[in-house]
Amino acid sequence: MKQKVKKLLAPFVAGSLIFSLAACSGNTSSSNTDSNGPVEITFSFDQGIGKPAQQLIDEYNASQDKVEVKTNILPQDANVVHDDFVNKLASGDTSVDVMAVDVVYVSEFAAAGWLEDLTPHFDKSTQDKYLPGTIAAATYDDKLVAFPWFTNASALFYRKDVLEQLGVQPPTTYQGWMDLADKAKGVNGVEYVADFQAAQSEALVCNWVEFVANNGGEVLDSSGKPVVNSKNNIESTQIMVDLVKKYAPEGITTYTEPESEQVFLDGKALFLRDWSGFWSQANREGSKVKDLVGVTTLPIGPNGEEPHSTLGGLDLVINKAIDDEHKKAAVDFIKYLSSEKAQKEMNLIAAQPPVLQSVYKDPEVLEVNPFYEDFYGIIMNGKARPMSPKYAKVSDAIQRNIHSALTGEVSVEKALEKTQSELEELSK
């Protein structure tokens, strides 16, 4: 599936940031290449994925003699990584050939003209083998400007033992979960129905866009125009407010992932909205909910037709400033990282959800991740966050205004009107 991402905003060249001295010292040539030896390319990523990435790099280097991949490892800090890439790309620095970019920044980099078009290297039949949402998030103005490496998506984790004792199946709607509140409270330690991430943070953006999508709403329409204050969005945000006020822990507006996870691990919540990786954490020795956790789709609202989860993960991009020889080598390396062999290995050694559909059906992968049988359907319907060249500012507007509604500082209507106004201003 290809999504034509319209330009909501004029390209935001984050070059307003002060470039580092290294970036400003002039263009650095791509890694030296001996005419009789392999082409050297440099792959840059953050140290959070360092060990599994290095293992794949070593195996790639050993598998052939035409390309040699070197690394440029950055701190595990999303802002530091983003700014380092911006500084290099905006200055025409060619010292890095391939970068692992957070999916939310693909539009920003593509709009600035920094990324190589990968469309000629991955035809439609190849793209169709990958999760549709990940291909859509890597596409800008009908061009495949990135390629998915690994992904993530949220799911609803719930207490199987409690629902079994109540004799009910997992509800498919928010109202269905709320209706269980009185019955579930006190059963096997449950104190709250709802548990998610509502602190003023990027986690809140991920949660809120799910409430919106699952009630038939959008943040941007098909032309890229903000449609934040729609009737459906008011309704979905009010559902979120109701869950915060009546069905969730008192401190939920300060919760990111760790705080919300702890409540569920302590056995106090009936359901938790979280990322797929929580499965292994919930089933570790010492967890009070070990072997008691089920996984299902997120609920839908009154106007929702099907559930959608937010997609995360990293995409692979090629620096457009490098020469053709290095671009060719970079494409070969990306094809390796996106291959079935590498996708499976990345999952088994690092528990990163693959982007290649076939890996979800691999017996060895299912043995390690049995919940993938349920998770596959969830991630197939995953959606990206609003794709904008000014994503950082869009995210900031959503965080501030939606959080003010959740804490009761302003009404839902006023919060969405303010968000709408700010996004419209950004589009000028």
Image: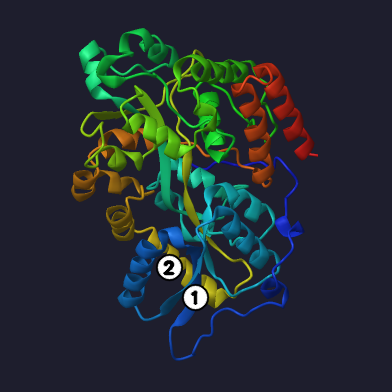
Residue 138 numbered tag: none
Q: Quadrant of the C terminus?
A: top right
Quick check: 127 above or below 18? above
Task: Classify 10 Å Cα crowding around label 2: few (below 14), some (14-19), many (20 and above).
Answer: many
Q: Quadrant of residue 281?
A: top left
Residue in the image at 61% along x and 23% along y: 407
Which residue corresponds to mark 1? 41
Q: Position of residue 210 (x, y in %)?
A: 50, 29
Quick check: 416 above or below 122? above
Left or right position of 154 against 105: left
Residue in the image at 47% along x and 66% along y: 331
- The secondary element bearing badge 2 is classed as helix
Residue 223 seen from this side: no
Q: Position of residue 117 (x, y in %)?
A: 58, 59
What amino acid type is highlighted by mark number 1? Ile
Which one is in front, 62 or 222? Answer: 62
Residue 92 seen from this side: yes
Q: Earlier in the sequence, mark 2 or mark 1?
A: 1
Left or right position of 156 against 425: left
Q: Which color scheme does this rendered protein use?
A: rainbow
Quick check: 382 above or below 242? below
Q: Quadrant of residue 26?
A: bottom right
Which residue corresponds to mark 2? 333
Task: Answer whether labels 2 and 1 touch (C-beta < 8 Å).
Answer: yes
Left or right position of 196 against 402: left
- The secondary element bearing badge 1 is classed as strand
What amino acid type is highlighted by mark number 2? Phe
Task: Classify 10 Å Cα crowding around label 1: few (below 14), some (14-19), many (20 and above).
Answer: many
